[in-house]
Image (cartoon, grey):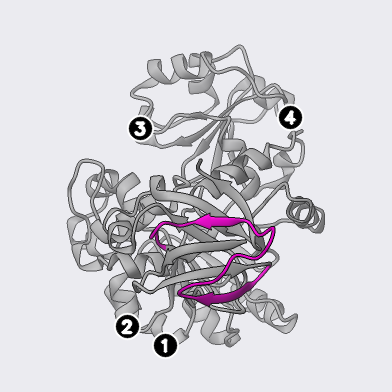
């Protein structure tokens, strides 16, 4: 294919000939016989976006799950109405996601039985750490005597009993293509060999069009009530010995402090990552920089949850949330992701949040952490194994491209997914808007 009249983000005008890789670039290239010509008409062409932290199967399942976050539900009666109106999935469950206590208070089996007793219900907390089940759901899993129906997501003693129909990965992948996403990193912890093989098969067979990278078996979620430095250091050392980098889920200051100390004790692997870094106290910035570890963070949560943070987090700590500019200034490698389904899947919305730092109500949260639009784009164009190293549109690189229907200056000003005109993966047009 020949992409004609393209403009790179630096303003360079060029034609781009692609096979699986970019074969040639010049201001004017003659079409070859039989070659498809795509007229970019002066629109920006950039490396395809890579979402560096998401959860493939959960994100695909969330597309057909009911949303019950505070933005959708106000009070228990409303929660009951939403759950009762939701049809069960193919496995017989009403599956709800995105719950936070601000919607209708704490949940347990008694609360869910009161509002929706007649069908098996499981509700995921928006943190992804917990599920809440009603009595009908617990009975289906052989847990009729469970005291409260509050179950840890990572506990295989109950999750292995779930029969889960494979979600529609193809439709979800098509949605990502419409955003210009050409690569994804699955950050789901505890995937076994069969899980990973299934994802790779979906990628190989074209069900997942995006290039796939998987963090397992090096992904680990830390919990404040189980922070054992020696155990974590030994686990990291074991992974490093096997040549596997680690990715440590850190959403609290305590988790970050222990993770950095464990990484220091175990020694460095160039692929080590801190996931989220939702809270970075001032005193941890230097240690994070000295550790040489890459941070993969999600500033979209400033827009999606910022008003809740402003209510729940002391004002003196607001500047520590979802830091970006401070980390980059200190020399920390930083990359972006959406964390879908726990965050919204649109990477352009994440970029806007990083640039503007505005909450849903329009308040500013962490103005000092703003970055430029160009930097925000760059943090979504890193390599799979080196997320903070931005890729370029150059001869010899993979032909994974995002073509926009606007010139670079407009594209950077708007950062809008609606500007994605086409997505190319390995030289193949996988998404043409029209």
The residue to which callout 1 is attached is 290
Distance of label 3 from label 2 (alpha carbons):
36 Å
Q: Quadrant of the N terminus?
A: bottom right
Q: Secondary structure at mark 1?
A: helix
Distance of label 2 from label 1 (alpha carbons):
9 Å
The residue to which callout 3 is attached is 70
Residue 170 x %, y %? 67, 41
Q: Secondary structure at mark 2?
A: loop
Residue range in magenta is 20-44
Q: Which is in the foreground here, disc 3 or disc 2?
A: 2
The first of marks 3 and 1 along the sequence is 3
The first of marks 2 and 1 along the sequence is 1
Q: Are marks 3 and 2 in contact (CB under 8 Å)?
A: no
- The tag on residue 330 is 2
Q: Secondary structure at mark 4?
A: loop
Residue 5 x %, y %? 44, 63
- The tag on residue 141 is 4
Q: Which is in the foreground here, disc 2 or disc 1?
A: 2
């Amino acid at each position: 294919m020949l992409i004609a009249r393209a403009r790179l983000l630096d303003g360079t005008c060029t034609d781009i000939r692609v096979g699986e890789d970019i074969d040639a670039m010049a201001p004017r290239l003659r079409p070859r016989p039989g070659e498809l010509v795509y007229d970019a008409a002066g629109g920006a062409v950039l490396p395809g976006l890579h979402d560096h932290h998401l959860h493939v199967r959960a994100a695909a399942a969330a597309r057909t799950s009911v949303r019950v976050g505070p933005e959708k539900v106000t009070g228990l009666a409303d929660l009951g109405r939403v759950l009762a109106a939701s049809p069960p999935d193919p496995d017989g469950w009403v599956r709800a996601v995105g719950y936070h206590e601000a919607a209708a208070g704490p949940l347990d089996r008694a609360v869910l039985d009161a509002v929706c007793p007649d069908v098996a219900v499981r509700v995921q907390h928006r943190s992804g750490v917990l599920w809440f089940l009603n009595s009908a759901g617990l009975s289906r899993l052989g847990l009729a005597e469970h005291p409260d129906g509050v179950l840890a997501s990572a506990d295989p003693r109950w999750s292995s009993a779930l029969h889960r129909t494979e979600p529609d990965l193809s439709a979800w992948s098509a949605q990502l293509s419409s955003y210009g996403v050409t690569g994804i990193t699955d950050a789901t912890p505890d995937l076994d060999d069969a899980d990973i093989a299934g994802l790779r098969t979906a990628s190989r067979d074209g069900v997942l069009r995006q290039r796939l990278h998987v963090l397992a078996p090096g992904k680990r979620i830390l919990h404040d009530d189980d922070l054992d430095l020696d155990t974590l250091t030994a686990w990291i050392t074991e992974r490093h010995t096997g040549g596997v980098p680690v990715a440590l889920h850190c959403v609290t200051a305590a988790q970050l402090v222990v993770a950095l100390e464990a990484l220091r004790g175990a020694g460095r692997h160039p692929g080590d990552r801190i996931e989220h870094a939702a809270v970075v106290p001032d005193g941890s910035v230097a240690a994070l920089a000295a550790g040489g570890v890459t941070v993969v963070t999600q500033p979209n949560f400033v827009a999606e949850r910022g008003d809740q943070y402003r209510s729940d987090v002391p004002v003196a700590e607001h500047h520590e949330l979802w830091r970006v500019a401070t980390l980059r200034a200190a020399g920390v490698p930083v990359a972006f992701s959406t964390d879908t389904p726990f965050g919204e899947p649109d990477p352009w919305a994440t970029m806007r949040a990083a640039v503007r730092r505005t909450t849903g109500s329009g308040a500013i949260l962490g103005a000092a952490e703003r970055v430029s639009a160009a930097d925000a784009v760059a943090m979504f164009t890193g390599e799979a194994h080196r997320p903070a190293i931005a890729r370029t549109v150059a001869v010899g690189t993979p032909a994974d491209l995002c073509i926009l229907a606007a010139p670079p200056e407009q594209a950077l000003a708007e950062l809008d997914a609606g500007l994605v005109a086409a997505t190319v993966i390995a030289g193949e047009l996988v998404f043409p808007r029209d």
